[in-house]
Amino acid sequence: MKRNTLALLGVLTVLLVASVGVHAEEATVGVTGNAEFKVSAKELRDTIKEERKALFEEGKEARETLREKNKTARENLREENKSEREQFRINAEASLEGKTPEEKAALMVTIKADRKALSDKNQAERQEFRKAQWDKRKSVTVNIRANVEAFRESVRVRWEALLTSFGRK
């Protein structure tokens, strides 16, 4: 009986050691897989961080470029309007030279009407210019938002792929 008990105890010990060894091997594989996952996840986070910075800089550059173009266009419009007003003033003064007071009074009425027409034309140009600037700004903002949304979606897809490849999802 002692022999049977010892033999049975020996068999159970071998089975126990064998099963512990299998679990230990599985645990080692799990740890190795976990380490690989952590490395892959860190690489993905670093890549995403760099891409996010690049996307931010791209948007910042687009806004800055638009700001500079608008500033230049605004200055050009201002100078053009200023030169038109100056030319109008010079022409009005020249047309008044050597005229009698009655003729000057009649010319002043037409000059005043022409000045009003020039002012209205310049105001309409400014409003049109502002609308064009707004449309460009809106277009750049929409483009930036679309790029950000596409980036978010690509990040989500890459994370899902990583999780799936390591059996985490």
Image (spheres, rainbow, N blue to C red):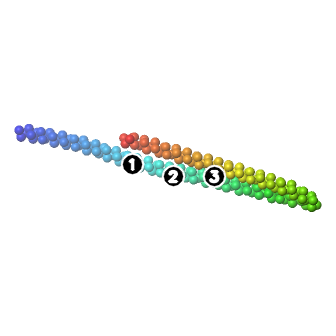
The picture quadrant where one finds residue 15 is: top left
Determine contact: label 2, label 3, CB under 8 Å.
no
Circle 1 crowding by C-alpha within 10 Å: few under 14, some 14–19, many from 20: few
For label 3, the SS is helix
Disc 2/disc 3 C-alpha distance (Å): 20 Å
Amino acid under label 3? Answer: Leu
Q: Name the image quarter holding the C terminus.
A: top left
Q: Earlier in the sequence, mark 2 or mark 3?
A: 2
Q: Earlier in the sequence, mark 2 or mark 1?
A: 1
Say whether residue 81 is left or right of residue 36.
right
Judge depth for marks 2 and 3 and give the one in front: 3
Amino acid under label 2? Answer: Lys
Count of picture labels = 3
Residue 66 numbered mark, or none: 3
Whole-percent x, y for residue 71 in the image? 67, 55
Report the front residue among 57 and 91. 91
The picture quadrant where one finds residue 24 is: top left
Amino acid under label 1? Answer: Val
Disc 3/disc 1 C-alpha distance (Å): 41 Å
Judge depth for marks 2 and 1 and give the one in front: 2
Whole-percent x, y for residue 74 in the image? 70, 55
Q: Name the image quarter holding the N terminus.
A: top left
For label 2, the SS is helix
Could you tell me which residue is drawn at 25 percent across and 43 percent down?
23
Residue 39 numbered mark, or none: 1
Say whether residue 29 is left or right of residue 3.
right
Q: Is residue 99 visible?
A: no
Disc 2/disc 1 C-alpha distance (Å): 21 Å
Whole-percent x, y for residue 105 in the image? 90, 59
Q: Which of marks 3 and 1 is nearer the N terminus?
A: 1
Determine contact: label 3, label 1, CB under 8 Å.
no
Could you tell me which residue is drawn at 59 percent across and 49 percent down?
141
